Structures are given as C-alpha cells and as structure tokens.
Image (tube, rainbow, N blue to C red):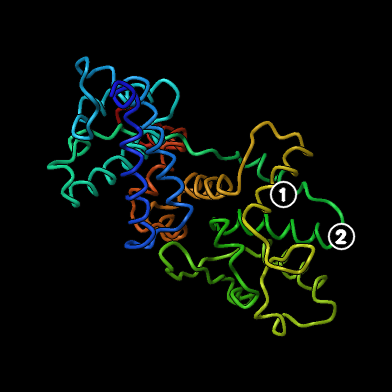
Amino acid sequence: MQNVRRNPSAIMKRWVEAFIQSLLAERGFSSHTCRAYRTDLTQFCTYLDNAAADQLPPGRSFDIHDVDDLMIRSYLAFLHEKYEKTSIARKLSALRSFFRFLVKKSILRRNPAETVLTPKRGRPVPNYLPVDETFRLLDGVKGDSLLAFRNRAILETLYSTGLRVGELVGMNVGDVDFDKGFVRVLGKGNKERLAPIGKKALSCIVDYLDKRGKGKSVREMNSEPLLVNRFGTRLTARSVGRLLETVIRELGLIRPITPHGLRHTFATHMLDAGTDLRTVQELLGHASLTTTQRYTHVSIDRLMQVYDKAHPRR
C-alpha cells in the first residue's frame, strides 16, 4: 500500500494509455500528436511520484480523485523553472484534455485543470534582417551550378513574396504566372491565394528552370515541382532551412535567420516603406489582422520619425 501511495503514476498511466487510444481510435489523431500527449502526461505522472503524493495523509493510498487544481498549479510552478511559457501552456492543455476524457468516462465528476489559468504567452520580436544584410544574403550565392541557380531562386522568391517555406516547396512550375507576375499558393487551411512576385525573383526562377529543363519549355514542366533536390524529387522545408544556415555561415552574417525569418523580413520592409497593414495582411495570407500586427512594433523607429515630422506639437 505504501508503494502505491509513493507511485501514483502506476494508477495514472493506465488512464493515460486509455486516453491515448481514444485519441487514435475515436478522434483520428496522428501518431506524432499522440506521442506528444503521452510525453506531456507521463511527465505529470512522474511529478506526482516525486512530489504530489507526499501531500497525502500518512497511510492513505493515492487515488486519481486526489488530483486537484492546487496540485496542478504546483506542477506548473515546478515547470516554470525550466520551460518557456509556450511549452507550459501546451502541457496544461494536454492535462485539460486528459481530465476532460476522465469526466466523460464518469471517472471524475469535474475537471481539476479547467479552472487553472493558462500562462500568458509573450510575443517575441520577430527576427528579421535589415535591408543591407538582406541584400548581402541574396547576393551571397555564387556559381553557375544547378544548385546555385536553384538556391538563388529560393532566397529571392522567399524575400520577394513573403511566402511560408511550406507554401514555397509545395508549388509546381505551373503555379507561377510569369506574364502577370503572380504565384498561386496553397496556404494554411488549404486556402488558395495569389501573391505578387518581383521581376528579380522571376528572373532567377526562369534561369533555374532553363538550366534544369535541358531544352524543355516552362510549359512542358508545368506539372513538375518548382523546386527539386539533387535526386529530382520535391524539395523539403527542412532542406531549405539547411540551405539558409549554410549560406549564413559562409557569409559570416551576424544575425541568424530562418526561412520564416525571411517572411518576417519581407513584412517589416514592406511596412517600413509605408505599406498599410491590411495590404501586408493580404500579402502574408493571414486570416486575422491581429496576427499581422505583431510586425508593427519592429518598425517603431519609422513610426517615431513620422510622428516627429508630422505632429504640430511634437
């Protein structure tokens, strides 16, 4: 009995597995998502073994009904020592879903995690490059190999359009309208949109396809992936990330930047040049203007300059 009291996870883990199976069978969750749920919930079980069970009166075995909101708050305080708020919020969400499952199965009468507040997540300043460093990056890929042509097309297109890297690698050649200067992309939620693309990026894409096609016209390549690896198959987002890391390392750039950072760079430079927020929202494919607004505070210097110049009682 004492061993059970000191190891409440022996009881908890049975219900965790039942919960995971329900996610797989009833809700169709992916194995990756279920693995993440299991990891988070197992961590809570371990916490109960090491700390929470000692809060029980001597001689009484642990019962799943002993988990209350105070115990969960203590767990979150423990997590604060080594985790970011976003990770803690995710772990709390996993606990809420788990205990909601137990309520649904009539194991518990109430969800002890329901009243626990989610940690407020700070909004980090998006990482971006100044204009001069951006140009240095874009001009940094040298050579006349097929990979060099492709890599120039990748960097120029990311900066020219502000696309998500997943949107870029998902495109086919036929998604580029070379005459009108647009690309057709499939964004989040399978929403299709048209995004403008500059002449410099289009020129790099044409040069790349000409070298890759070996005599084939662009029209003949319409159904092929826009970007391919050395084996001729569709390039992955991870490969684009590795490419960017390599270029940054070779150029010795001070600021590390990711493919998504180039998207931030695009948005920041557009706002700096005076583009209104609604237009940037459309260009980025954001469903909500609130998402786009996080880019505005990186342009505070420009706003202050406009204010100082325009306000009559500055």
Question: Which dot marks residue 243?
Answer: 1
**In the image, is residue 305 above or below residue 23?**
above
Q: Looking at the image, is 111 positioned above or below residue 202?
A: above
Q: Position of residue 282 (x, y in %)?
A: 42, 61
The C terminus sits in image quarter = top left
Q: Amino acid at mark 2?
A: Ser
Residue at the spot x=46%, y=48% of the render? 35
Instruction: Look at 46% across and 33% down and name the residue there.
Output: 301
Counting residues from the N terminus, which is met first, the one under dot 1 or under dot 2?
A: 2
Disc 1 + disc 2, Cβ < 8 Å: no
Seen from this angle, which residue lies furthest front?
1
Q: Quadrant of residue 249?
A: top right
Mark 2 element type: loop
Find residue 104 and report its horizontal and vertical position in percent.
18, 52
Marks 1/2: CA–CA distance: 15 Å
Instruction: Report the disc number at residue 145.
Output: 2
Report the side of 183 relative to 107 (left or right). Answer: right
Residue pictured at 22% horizontal, 36% vertical: 113
Q: Which mark is residue 116?
A: none
Q: Give the quadrant of residue 76.
A: top left
